[in-house]
Structures are given as C-alpha cells and as structure tokens.
C-alpha cells in the first residue's frame, strides 16, 4: 500500500476565479489542492488511492455535479464528497445527501466553515482508511489459522474455558492449550481482550457463513 | 386546396352536422307521418259518410216498396218519381197478370219466399237496377237510377274534384260514382263495405292515393331551417364560450409564464453573482490568513486582493448586464390611441368569473369612449393587476359591504382612471413601500405586481399612485396621456 505524503483536496469547478481563490484559501491551512476545470477530466485522472476529500460544484456545463457524485459512489470511491452550490434548494440538498454526499455547502462559503468541513472530511477519511487496513490485516491473519484453531477461537470468543473447550471438542486440555498458544501467536494478539475485540466480528462472520 | 379546406371544416363540424341532420330528418319524418295520419283519418271519415248516406238511400227504397205493397194504391204510383228522382219507374203486376220479364217473375218468387225485398237484376253499365217486393194482391217493382240516387247535399266534397275514387260493386259489375285521382307510388288508402240493406248488398269501395307532392314540404323545410338556425346559434354561443375560455386560459398561462421566467431569471442571477462573490470572499479571507502568518506572506496576499477586486468588478458587470436585459428595449414602442373604457370592459369581461364568485358588481363610468395613449397589452396588464388587488382586498370585508367603483376623468392632457374599493384600505406604513419591488404583505406574494404596474405606467408616459378612499378602502389612480379622439 502506498501512503501519500499528506492529504489532497480535489476541487472541481468550471469557474477559474472560484477555483483559484478557493485553492489559495485551502492551501493556507496546509492542505494540498488539485484543481479540475472539467468533471470528465477529473473522473478520468484523479488518484483514487490517495487520502483526502473531493469538493464538487453542483452546477457545471456538460455534466452536473450530482451525476459526477453518482459516478463516484458507483465506482466505490471512498473519499468524502462535499457538494458546493450557488443556490441550494432543500430538494437539491436532499438529493445530494441521498446520493451519498458527505456535506453540502452554499456559495459564497465562509472560510471557517469550508476549512473545518474539509479538515473533518480528511480526518474521517484517514480514520476509515486506517480502520479498513486494520480490518484487512486481521483478515489476513485469520486466514492463516487451521480448521481446529478456528474452532478453538470460536469457543474462546464464546467465553468457554480451556477445560470446557476440551470437553466440547473431545480434546485434552493440554492440546487445547497448544492450539490456544498457536492462534495467539498467529493472530499477534497480546491479550484475550484484544483478541476478542479484533476477531469477534470475523468469527461471527465465519460462523454465519458456514452454518 | 379549397376543397381540402372545406373538407377539414366539415370534419371539425361533424358532430354539429350529424346532430343537425338527425334533428331535421327526425322532425320531418314526424311531420310527414302526422300529415299522412290526418289524411288517412279524413279519407276514412269521407268513406264512412259515403257508406252511410248510400245505405240510408237503399233502406229508403225498401221502405217505399213496403209502403206500396201495404197500401196497394190503384193509381198515382208515377208521382213517386217526382218526389224521389232516383225512382225511374214504378212497375206493378196486378193480380192475375204476369211480369213481362222473366227476371221479375223469378225475383217475385224469391221475394215471396223470403217475405223481403228482392233484387230483380241490375245493369251497372247503364246505372240502374230493379227492386221487387211480392205483395197481395199486386206486387211492385222499382227501377232505380244509381246516378240519381246520390245525395248531392250530404255528399262529402265535390264528386268531380274529389281525389277519392268511389265505386259500387256487385256481382262483377262496377258502377263508378266518382273517379278520383288514383296513381301508383306514394301511399294507398282503401275502404270497402257492403251497403246496410240485405236487398241491395252493393259493395262500397273507396280508394285514395297520396302522392309525394301531397306531403307538407313547406312545413318540413321550415322545420329543417329552424333546426339549422337553432344549431347555428348554439354553435356560435359555444364558439364564443370556447374563445372566452381560451382567452382566460391564455391570461392565466401568461401570468404563470411570467412567474416562471422570473424564477429562471432569479436563479440565473443567483448563479452569475455567486461565482464572483465566492471568489471575492475566498480571496479576501485567504489574504487575511496570509497576512496573519508569521511572517506575513505579502506577495501572495496582494495577488489574492487583486483577484478579489477583479471579481468584485465582474459582479458589478453582471448586475449591469442584467439591468440592460430587463430594461424595455424601446420605451414607448407599441403605444396607440385606444379607448380606455373598452380596455377596462375587456379585462372585466375576462375577470367575470371572479366578480360573480365574490358577488361584486363593478360600477363603470357612464361615458361611452375615453381615448388615451397606451400600449394595449401593458394597459390590460395594469388593469388586471389593479382589479385582482381590489378583489383580494374586498375578500376581507363581508359580502354586503363590497363595492368597486371605477371613474374616468379628464385632466389637462391626461386621462385619469380611478379605481376605488371598499376593502380594508392600505395602512400608512405599507403605503410608503407600496410600489417597491419585492415588498409584499401577502403570504406567498412576490411583491412585484404593483411595482411592475408602476414601471409599465411610467413607460407609457403615465403614472400610478394610491391613496385612501374615505371612509373605507383604497383608491388607485392610473394616469395616462390623453389622445385626440380618433
């Protein structure tokens, strides 16, 4: 996984003056900005794996901001999208949120509001990326477990003691202890609490998947 | 081309035509049927009269014979012919004598057997027949002339002129009483009945032909014309109704369209202004932040401020462009001399449903024509707005107190139209802002109606103002330049 240097804001607006002024304003708080005049060029060229947020004007020639939003969501782009509009009607606002916009701002927009919204969006994006990568790592580790170790893990998560697990699986407490030590090592868990917190959902998903 | 146009017109009118044809045909059929019925009734009455009077005559013959047989007069029978012209001769067979003709002897034998009058032969070709009654000592016979038998005074109609043919028939012989006028085609009436005397069972046959020309064509034509006239009238009324509905619809649509284009204008304006305003705001705020840095980034801040100034100019250009678009291209174009009162009547006519619904009877000036110089559409728009305002004001007072008076007065070079309502009136604080755009006291109102009216009045070289209408209500005064009477 490539980790970008710092968050990048994608700004899409057909008006050069608006684009430049907003880019300048955003750069004053140390966020990097990439500006796009055309929605099609943006859709074709922006780096999807980067950390950041998308600031999208609703009203543009050729393709409306709302349909750009639709395409982004359909593609599974995870950067938060902030819609920017000249005349925000309730209807437009509702449609934007329904389509998956993270925020809806009206032009002209105050610096505090804009910058705070962007910073919040970036923070959320970073967190969700971290959560996702943690989840992915846990999944990879979980995949290394043997069938027996998964059974033992399921019973540990269910709250059974070694003795009870041994009885349930017709194993000696000693064997159970070996499995337990192995799976703690494979899952890189340092405590029972951490093990349960990180893997309970995976165990439940696995049990739900193979009833 | 012409034929095509006529065909199209007919196609459009097809329901009217169908209704007209159905009504006209149905009515004409009914009229014809009734005429035929009454002709038939008259024929049957005449035929019955003929049968009755002939029956009376033949019964009389039996009575005469019976009298002769009973009284057995020795002489004077010849005088009977003087009294009854149809009795051509009275014959008598004295006791012991015999009849000169065999048919008389045969008839006497029959008569003697039945004790009744017997027919002793007939000669319809010569128009005569003989009756005989056997008696004692003498028997009597009457020679009767058919032609002389007809009772002129009781006969229905003139036998020579009557269209009814009447015949007497007996044993294959036919006596024509009157020829009538029979012909093929049309309608045929017939009547047939034996005379009511056993001795003279002649068949009375009456016939009558009704030809097509005898139908009441005049009446039927009149009916058809009446139907056509009625339908034409109904059609015209309907056309007027449609035209009026269309005019109202257009007026309403015009208002909606105005509102829509206003909304479009506002949205466009918002976008056009928002872009530079956004840039101005972002640039100035960025500059503030840059200046607050330690050390301040003067160059970038200066650039941002330059940008802001440029964008502010851009915003003001948008406003200027908008004003040029909204301004009427040529003030005073389309102004003509027109009758102010006629325009007023026209607008009131369109608003008639509104006045009727509210129970308002507008009082109009008594003058017949008032010539003013105005643009017809703009004038009607002003009048429409003012009247609708007055109606809405009158809605706020009880129905009994609603009055609306319109006066037209001549001033020096101007015509003044005063519209007074008895509504709640205009409060002083509202009066000051009355003609300002976007000022409204009405929920959901745009606040553009009166402002637009004033702009229109000014563009026509007139003016619009409002004042109180003591004791209650408001008065709007529209002034327009007077025109020389055309």
Image (cartoon, coloured by chain):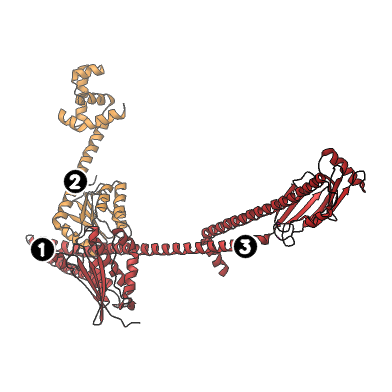
Chain colours: A orange, B red
The residue marked by circle 2 belongs to what chain? A
Badge 1 element:
loop
Identify which residue is drawn at 39% across, 62% down: B245
Residue B147 occupies which quadrant of the picture? Answer: bottom right
Q: Which residue is mark 3?
A: B217
Which of pointers 1 and 3 lies earlier in the amino acid sequence? Answer: 3
Report crowding for label 1: few under 14, some 14 to 19, many 20 or more residues within 10 A (C-alpha): some
Q: Position of residue A156 (x, y in %)?
A: 20, 24
The residue marked by circle 3 belongs to what chain? B
Where are the magenta residues, as a range?
B153-159
Point out the image quarter for the C terminus of chain A.
Answer: top left
Identify which residue is drawn at 44% across, 63% down: B237
Q: Which mark is residue B137?
A: none
Residue B462 occupies which quadrant of the picture? Answer: bottom left
Badge 3 element:
helix
Q: Position of residue B439 (x, y in %)?
A: 19, 64
Is B8 positioned to the left or the right of B151 in the image? left
Q: Nearer the viewer, residue B162 or A140?
A: B162
Q: Which residue is mark 1?
A: B297
* Outermost residue toward the left in this view: B294
Residue B157 painted magenta: yes
Q: Which residue is mark 2?
A: A124
User: Does residue B407 sit above or below A19 in this rendering?
Assistant: below
């Amino acid at each position: 996984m490539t980790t970008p240097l710092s968050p990048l804001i994608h700004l899409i607006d057909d008006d050069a003056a608006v684009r430049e002024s907003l880019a300048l304003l955003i750069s004053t708080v140390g966020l990097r900005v990439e500006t796009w005049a055309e929605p099609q060029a943006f859709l074709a060229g922006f780096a999807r794996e980067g950390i950041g947020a998308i600031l999208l004007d609703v009203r543009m020639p050729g393709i409306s901001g709302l349909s750009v939003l639709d395409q982004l969501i359909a593609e599974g782009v995870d950067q938060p999208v902030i819609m920017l509009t000249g005349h925000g009607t309730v209807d437009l606002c509702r449609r934007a949120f329904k389509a998956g916009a993270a925020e809806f701002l009206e032009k002209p927009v105050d610096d505090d509001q804009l910058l705070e919204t962007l910073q919040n969006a970036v923070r959320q994006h970073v967190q969700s990326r971290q959560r996702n990568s943690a989840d992915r790592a846990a999944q990879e580790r979980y995949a290394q477990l043997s069938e027996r170790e998964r059974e033992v893990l399921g019973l540990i998560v269910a709250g059974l003691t070694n003795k009870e697990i041994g009885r349930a699986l017709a194993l000696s407490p000693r064997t159970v202890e070996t499995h337990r030590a192995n799976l703690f090592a494979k899952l890189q868990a340092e405590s029972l609490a951490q093990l349960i917190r990180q893997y309970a959902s995976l165990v439940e998903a696995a049990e739900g998947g193979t009833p | 081309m012409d034929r095509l146009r006529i065909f199209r017109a007919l196609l459009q009118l097809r329901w009217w035509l169908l209704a007209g044809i159905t009504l006209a045909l149905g009515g004409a059929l009914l009229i014809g049927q009734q005429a035929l019925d009454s002709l038939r009734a008259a024929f049957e009455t005449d035929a019955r009269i003929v049968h009755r009077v002939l029956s009376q005559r033949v019964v009389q013959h039996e009575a005469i014979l019976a009298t002769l047989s009973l009284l057995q007069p020795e002489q004077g029978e010849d005088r009977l012919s003087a009294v009854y012209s149809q009795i051509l001769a009275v014959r008598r067979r004295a006791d012991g004598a015999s009849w000169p003709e065999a048919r008389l002897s045969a008839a006497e034998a029959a008569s003697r057997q039945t004790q009744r009058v017997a027919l002793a032969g007939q000669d319809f070709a010569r128009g005569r027949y003989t009756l005989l009654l056997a008696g004692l000592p003498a028997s009597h016979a009457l020679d009767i002339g058919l032609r002389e038998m007809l009772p002129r005074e009781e006969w229905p109609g003139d036998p020579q002129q009557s269209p009814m043919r009447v015949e007497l028939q007996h044993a294959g012989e036919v006596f024509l009483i009157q020829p009538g006028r029979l012909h093929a085609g049309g309608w045929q009436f017939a009547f047939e009945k034996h005379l009511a005397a056993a001795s003279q069972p002649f068949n009375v046959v009456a016939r009558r032909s009704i030809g097509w020309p005898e139908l009441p064509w005049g009446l039927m034509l009149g009916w058809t014309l009446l139907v056509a006239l009625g339908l034409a009238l109904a059609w015209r009324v309907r056309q007027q109704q449609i035209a009026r509905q269309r005019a109202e619809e257009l007026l309403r649509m015009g208002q909606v369209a105005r509102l829509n284009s206003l909304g479009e204008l506002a949205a466009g304006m918002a976008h056009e202004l928002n872009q530079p305003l956004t840039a101005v705001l972002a640039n100035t705020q960025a500059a503030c932040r840059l200046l607050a840095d330690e050390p301040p980034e003067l160059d970038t801040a200066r650039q941002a401020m330059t940008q802001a100034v440029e964008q502010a100019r851009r915003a003001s250009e948008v406003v200027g462009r908008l004003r040029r678009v909204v301004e009427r291209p040529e003030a005073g174009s389309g102004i003509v001399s027109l009758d102010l009162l006629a325009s007023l009547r026209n607008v009131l006519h369109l608003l008639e449903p509104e006045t009727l619904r509210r129970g308002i009877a507008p009082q109009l000036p008594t003058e017949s024509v008032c010539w003013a110089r105005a643009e017809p559409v703009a004038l009607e728009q002003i009048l429409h707005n003012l009247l609708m305002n007055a109606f809405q004001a009158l809605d706020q007072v009880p129905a009994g107190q609603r009055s609306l008076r319109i006066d037209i007065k001549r001033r020096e070079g101007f015509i003044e139209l005063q519209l007074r309502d008895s509504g709640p009136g205009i409060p002083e604080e509202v009066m000051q802002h009355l003609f300002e755009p976007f000022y409204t006291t009405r929920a959901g109102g745009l606040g553009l109606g009166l402002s637009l009216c004033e702009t229109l009045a000014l563009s026509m070289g007139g003016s619009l103002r409002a004042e109180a209408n003591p004791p209650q209500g408001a008065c709007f005064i529209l002034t327009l330049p007077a025109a020389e009477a055309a």
